[in-house]
Every structure is written in structure tokens, then in C-alpha cells.
Amino acid sequence: MAQIMSINRGLTMPIRPRHLAEEIFRPYYEILYDCVVAGLGDYPKEYSRVASKHRANTKRSIVRDHIVDRLRKNFIDTKIRVREKYGTTYFGFGGHFRMIVRKLNENQRVALNSTQLAFDIQYNDDTPPLGHLFAGTTSVYLGYFLTDDPENPDVFIVCPDGVRNAWDISILPPAKKSGEVHEFPLPPGPPSDDDLVRIPEQLPSRERNE
């Protein structure tokens, strides 16, 4: 395997620094997180009757397809470029990064398929060619790791660099939006008879004098 990789690997791309990735991806953190969570939720909703028949890698591929589909729809009116090549969808960010959706393990590593394409992405090679808008871009994974709470996965942007990761960025759940409905306590009701302070009635001054 190592010998095949050393023969067929293409031009290695530069590993761009973490701070540049934070600057470029930060405006999209909320979209990225929400698409991962929604894509994960699509699986139990749409495949509950046949989920037991799916192999683990089949389920992983289905979930990835749903996440990718949601990303596509959210990026329609943006400057994010989308390319499909050999069954893999790439999202191009500003001529600096190409992003691929993958499931991670607890060590923030990707379970690689035994294909040359998977190794090329892991080693940040410029293959397959995706056109001049993607040329020289650094590969990163939009990755997720399932936790005990299926509605709150751990979501990361991970930059692969061969047998290790160069860096990773944790994407936290978005904060509450200003348009969300907040519940406030109801105002107190009218006081009960026991809480009322009673003032004794006073007769008019003429009646008191008589």
C-alpha cells in the first residue's frame, strides 16, 4: 500500500495555517453545524424501517449524502464553489480550501477507504483536478463525531496531513438567535381575599357629630 501511494501520489498542496481557516470559515460556522445536525437527523426520520438492514458504511454514506445535500442548498446564493468528481463532492472556499464531508472517530481521524482518491485527499494531493478555482487548494474535512446525545454531535474542520492531522477547529453549536421565542413567567394573578388590606368605613362628619 505504501509503495502504491508513493508511486501514484500527485503534487502535494500547501497546508495553510489554522488562523487562515478560522478567518475564512467563521462566517459559515452556523451553516456547517446546522447542516451536520440536520443531516444526521434525516437518517432516523427517513430510514427507520430499514435502518437495521444497512451496514455501518452504508449508513455513513447516506448520512454524508444528506449533509452534502443540505450544504448545497445553503450555498446556492453564496460564493462557495461546488464540484462533483468520482462520487465525492468538494466545496471550494475562496481559492484557499476544498472541503469534503466525512465521519470522524474519537481521535478526529477519518476512516479511509482503500482507494487512491481517499489517500490523495488524506495526503493533500491536488487530485483529482477540479479546475482553476480549486487549483492549489488545501483539503479539509467537515467532520463529525457522534456523542451520547445524537442531537449534539461534535463537529470539526480537520486538515489532514498524511498519517496525522495538521490542525483542527471545533465548531460549537450556534448561540440563540435574537428572533427566538423566549418563555417568560406569567404576571401574578389578582390577590386573594386573604392578601387584601381592609380599611374600615368612616361615616360622614355630620353623622359622627349626631
Image (spheres, rainbow, N blue to C red):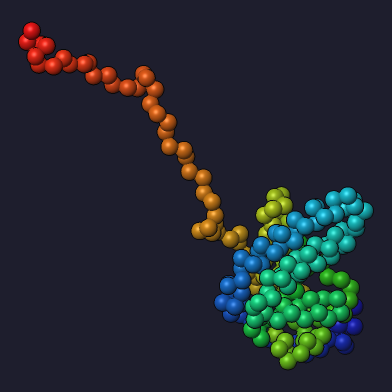
In the picture shown, does residue 175 fall above or below 162?
above
What residue lies at 59% left-to-right and 78% top-to-bottom? 24
In the picture shown, does residue 120 fall above or below 188?
below
Q: Quadrant of the N terminus?
A: bottom right
* Residue positioned most to the left: 209
In the picture shown, does residue 113 fall above or below 125?
above
What residue lies at 70% left-to-right and 81% top-to-bottom? 81
* Residue positioned most to the top: 210
Q: Is residue 123 visible?
A: no
Please state which of residues 58 and 197 is positioned toward the viewer in this rendering. Answer: 197
* Residue positioned most to the bottom: 132
What residue lies at 42% left-to-right and 33% top-to-bottom? 188
Q: In the rendered image, which quarter is residue 192 located in? A: top left
Q: Position of residue 205 (x, y in %)?
A: 9, 16
Q: Quadrant of the C terminus?
A: top left
What residue lies at 23% left-to-right and 19% top-to-bottom? 199
Q: Position of residue 195 (x, y in %)?
A: 35, 22
State left or right for residue 1 relative to residue 33: right
State left or right for residue 53 relative to residue 85: right
Q: Position of residue 105 (x, y in %)?
A: 76, 62
Q: In the rendered image, which quarter is residue 142 located in? A: bottom right
* Residue positioned most to the right: 53
State left or right for residue 33 relative to residue 105: left
Q: Is residue 201 visible?
A: yes
Q: Position of residue 167 (x, y in %)?
A: 65, 73
Please state which of residues 37 and 102 is positioned toward the viewer in this rendering. Answer: 37
State left or right for residue 194 relative to residue 143: left
